[in-house]
Image: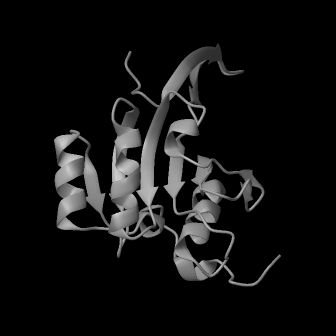
Amino acid sequence: MDFGDDVTRVETHLSSSGKEVFVMHARQRTVAVIGASADRSKFGNKAVRAFRDQGWLVFPIHPHRAEIEGVRAYPRLRDVPTPHLDRVSFYVPPEVGLSVIDDLAGMSVGEIWLNPGSESTELLQRLSQLGLATIQACSILALGRDPGEYSDQPE
């Protein structure tokens, strides 16, 4: 039986009534947030919290911060210690996005999300040249969360 890429292992057990029960173990989904911020009013910060709250393994990308919302941050995308990213979500201006996308070449990436304000024709063309599936939408809303749910105030 094929249960998809997110299922890493399936176990079968007999219930007390003698029926077979399947227990599926899912792989934790991974996301890199380009433009993660320590400023809680910024969408790059809200994205880190939203993905974390939804159970994703989050890799905040920030050139100078060691931690964002208690999660270890990485200075560059190529520093992320995982062989595959399910999603890379951009919360930076297009010119910054252009400066980091070459790190994506050769990486195993499921999809690229360009959040409002991060897209440009040049960036979209470059991502297309790299053969990367690109979505232009708010990745927080796609999780079923509203950015307004996340307080701008420090904890």
Residue 149 % position (x, y): 61, 79
The image quadrant where one finds the N terminus is top left
Tell me if 113 is positioned left or right of 77 in this view.
left
Is 32 situated above or below 155?
above
Looking at the image, how many numbered discs can be counted on the residues? 0
Of the 4 image quadrants, the one containing the C terminus is bottom right
Task: Depth check: give the residue in front, 119 or 143.
Answer: 119
- Return the residue nearer the eye: 112 or 77: 77
| Residue extending farthest right | 155
Residue depicted at 58% across the width and 38% down the height: 80
85 to the left or right of 26: left
- Where's residue 67, x and y in %? 74, 56
Q: Decide: is 48 above or below 18.
A: below
Quadrant in which residue 154 is drawn: bottom right
Picture coordinates of residue 83, whole percent (x, y)? 50, 27
The residue depicted at 35 percent of the width and 76 percent of the height is 117
Q: Residue 57 appears at what percent x and percent y? A: 62, 44
Establish if 78 lies above or below 59: above
29, 104: nearer the viewer: 104
Q: Quadrant of residue 97?
A: bottom left
- What residue do we see at 40% from left, 32% from top? 107
Here the colouring is one colour
Query: Quick check: 36 left or right of 38?
Result: left
Residue drawn at the location 21% of the way across and 50% of the way down = 126
